[in-house]
Amino acid sequence: MNISETQLSVNDYLDLYLYAESINDQLWKQEIVEKLQNSRNEIRKEIQSFKDKHLLEKYKHINEEIRIIYQQLRIHSSNEYLLEEFRRLKQRRVLLGLQIQSAKHHSP
């Protein structure tokens, strides 16, 4: 179920909840609330999965940039710009690695 389908489902459940309330069916209202909570959890999982994939893509991209600069440094070892860019990318990779680890520890 993708986010837009989940959203449609949530809207449907809200309508059903209002109807259950109008006919004073407490059990049905409770079932609907539980289904809405499950939908909310599904949305959270999808969002977290998207964030995780995005972080990993950024990490891969930085690794590729580092590889390219490393190859250039093998030819032009005294190029200050390349050395600085290499250091900057390595620092970004470390920070991104920490974000990825944090996301793994905080995922549901």
Image (spheres, rainbow, N blue to C red):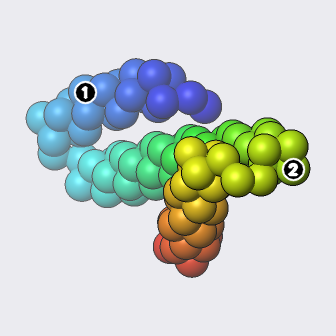
Instruction: Give the amino acid type for the residue marked by disc 2 in the picture.
Output: Arg
* Residue projecting furthest to the front: 78
Q: Is residue 26 above or below residue 58?
A: below
- Image quarter hosting the N terminus: top right
Residue 81 location in percent, x, y? Answer: 56, 45
Of 17 and 80, nearer the camera is 80
Q: Residues within 10 Å of mark 2 (few under 14, many from 20)?
A: few
Taking 28 as reference, is 14 above or below it? above
Q: How crowded is mark 1: few (under 14 residues within 10 Å), some or many (20 or more)?
A: few
Please indicate, yes or no, whether residue 38 appears anywhere in the rendered image.
no
* Residue drawn 39% across the image and 28% down it: 7
Query: Which residue sits at x=26%, y=33%?
Result: 14
Question: CA gap, disc 2 to disc 1?
Answer: 65 Å
- Residue depicted at 25% across the width and 27% down the height: 15
List x then y, in percent, for residue 86. 64, 54
Which of the two residues, 26 or 92, is positioned nearer the viewer here?
A: 92
Query: In the rendered image, which quarter is residue 69 located in?
Result: top right
What is the x, y in percent for residue 10?
36, 33
Q: Do the residues labelled 2 and 1 touch (CB within 8 Å)?
A: no
Which of the image's four quarters has the C terminus? bottom right
Residue at mark 1 = 15
- Residue at the spot 31% in from the left edge and 26% down from the top edge: 11
At mark 1, the secondary structure is helix
- Give the side of residue 74 with respect to residue 17, left or right: right
Q: Which mark is residue 69?
A: none
- Please tell me whether mark 2 sits on a helix, a strand or a loop: helix
Mark 2 vs mark 1: in front: 2
Q: Name the residue under label 2.
A: 74
Give percent across and percent down for residue 12: 35, 25
What amino acid does circle 1 point to?
A: Asp
The mark nearer the N terminus, 2 or 1, is 1
Q: Which residue lies furthest to the bottom in this view?
A: 105
